[in-house]
Image (cartoon, rainbow, N blue to C red):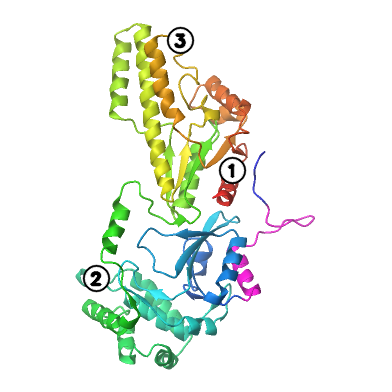
Amino acid sequence: MSLGLAPTAAPPRGGSVTPVPLVARLGAALGSRGISYCQWKGHGKRERWESGRGDIDLLVDRASWADFADVVAGLGFKLALPPPGREAAGIVHFFGLDERTGQLIHLHVYQRLVIGSPWRTHYRLPLEDALLQSATQATVFKTANPELEVIVLVLRQTLRHAVRDTLRREPPRWLDGAIAELDRLEDQVSHGAVITALKIYLPEVSVELFDRCRESLLPHCKPWRRVLARVLLTRALSVHASRAPVFAPLERLWERARPGSPSGQRLVSGGSVVALLGGDGSGKTTCADALEEWLSSSLATLHVHLGKPRRGILTYVVGALLKIARALGAKRERLLHLELLRFGCTARDRYRLYARARRFAARGGIAICERYPTREGWALSGPSEAQGRAVEGTSRAAERLRRWERHYYEQITSPDLVFLLQVDPDTAVARKTDEPAPYVRARAQLTVDTDWSQSGARIIDATQPLPQVVAALKSELWRSL
C-alpha cells in the first residue's frame, strides 16, 4: 500500500480547495463548542504562532476542560510533558500537525495563570475568572480586555529581571519585545482603566509598585532599579507564591547535561523507536534529516544511523589488523576469520547504538533510526551470513564468530514504527550515482521482493517528489505516535 497526502476536503469540480490552517480550525471549533477560554498573551504575534514558530498561550476554564480536550483530540493534537522541573502545576502542552504547512502547532495551555520560572519561586495570579469573563472574539481566538493584559504583561516581565543584568552594558534583548507589546496594548486602553482593574483584581500590588514595575521595562531605567522592582514585586505577591523544591535548579541542570537525556517535550503517549528502511537511493537519510528538523524544535528527538555506528576500540583494532594482513598477503583462511571478527565487532557497535536509541525512547523521546536491522531486512542490514558475505568459511572458529555476531542482531527487538521507502530499481540507480549500478539495482530489487507483511511496515512510495514523500511521512508518523 502506498501512502500519500490525505486531502482535507473534497475538491469541487474544475478546481481545488485550499486546506484550512489548523489554527483557524481550532479557533472555530472552540467557538462552536462554547468553550470558556482566552488567548491571554501573545495574540499580537499571529504570524509567528500560526506558522508554528511560536506557541499559543491559552487559558481554559476548568469547567470547560473536558470539552477543550475533546476538541484538540479531534483535531489531532497530542498531549506532551516537558522535562522535570520545566513546568508549573496546572499547565500542559499540546502539539498538532498542520498538514497544510507540515509544521507542528504548539498549544501552551493553562488552567491556572502562573507567572515566573517554574524551577524557581513562581506565582499564581488570581485573575483567571476576570480574564475569561472579559474575553471577546478576536481574529482567531478570544482575547481578554487590554487593561487586564497590561497588568499581566507588566508583572510577568518584571519577574524576568535578574541580578546578572546589572553587569551588562546593554539591556537584555527580551526587553525590546516587551516594550513593543506594552505599547501595542496601551494604545487600546487608558492608564486609568488599568489602575482601576488593578485595584479591583489585585489589590496587593499597589499603584506605586505597579508604576515602578512598568518603568522597569522602559529603556532609560537603570539596571539596579529593575532588580529592585522585581524584589518588591516578589514581596507583594508572596501570598501567591509556589516555591520549587530546593534542588529543582540542580535537577534541571543535570537533566540538561546528562548524556542521552531527552531535552525537549515528551508525548504523554510515550516515546517511540521509528525505523526508516529502504534500499540505496530511496532517500532514507534525506527523509530522516527532514523528520529530525521537523520534530526536534518541539519534541525530544534523536537521529541515529545504525548502518554507520560509532566504532569501538576493538573494531578499530580488528580493522587495522585486517588491513595489515591484506597488505602482507595473508592466506584467505586467516583473512576470512578477521573479516568475520570485524563483522562481529560491527554488530556489537550497532547493538550499542540500538540500546542508546531504546533508552532514549524509554525516557519519552522519539528515536529516528536509519538502517534498522529488522529480521525481514537482514539481507540489507544484518548478519554477514544473511547478506552472503564471508560464507565460504566452514571452520569451527568461523561458526563461533558467526554465532557471536548473530547473537547481537537477535537481541535487537522490532521497532515501534516501521516506514519502508520503496523505489523501483531504475529510479534507485538514477538517484544513487556514487555507487556501482549493479549493486544499487540488486539492493532495490531485494527491497521490492522482500515480504514485509509481518513487519507492520507502512510502505511509502518514494518515487514521488521529495516534498510529497516527506509530507506523507510526517502525516503518517504523527497519526501513529
Query: From what the image shows, is residue 339 above or below residue 262?
Result: above
Task: Let me know if residue 406 appears in the view.
Answer: yes
Give amino acid for label 2: Asp
Give the SS element for disc 3: loop
Label 2: how many residues lie within 10 Å, few (<14), some (14-19) or many (20+)?
A: some
Give amino acid for label 3: Glu
Q: Main secondary structure of the magenta part?
A: loop
The residue shown at (49%, 24%) is 435
Q: Identify the mark at residue 165; answer none if there is no mark.
A: 2
Q: Is residue 27 magenta?
A: yes
Q: Mark 3 touching mark 2, by CB under 8 A?
A: no
Task: Let me know if residue 336 appears in the view.
Answer: no
Dot 1 corresponds to which residue? 469
The residue shown at (40%, 44%) is 359
Q: Quadrant of the N terminus?
A: top right
x, y percent for residue 440: 54, 24
Give the number of the mark in front: 3 or 2.
3
The residue shown at (59%, 75%) is 35
Query: Which residues are drawn in magenta?
Result: 7-34
Asked if residue 170 lies left or right of residue 98, the reply is: left
Label 1: how many residues lie within 10 Å, few (<14), some (14-19) or many (20+)?
A: many
Distance of label 1 from label 3 (alpha carbons): 41 Å
x, y percent for residue 375: 52, 29
Query: From what the image shows, is residue 474 above or below residue 304?
Result: below
Give the SS element for disc 1: helix
Query: From what the image shows, is residue 350 above or below residue 8?
Result: above
Dot 3 corresponds to which residue? 392
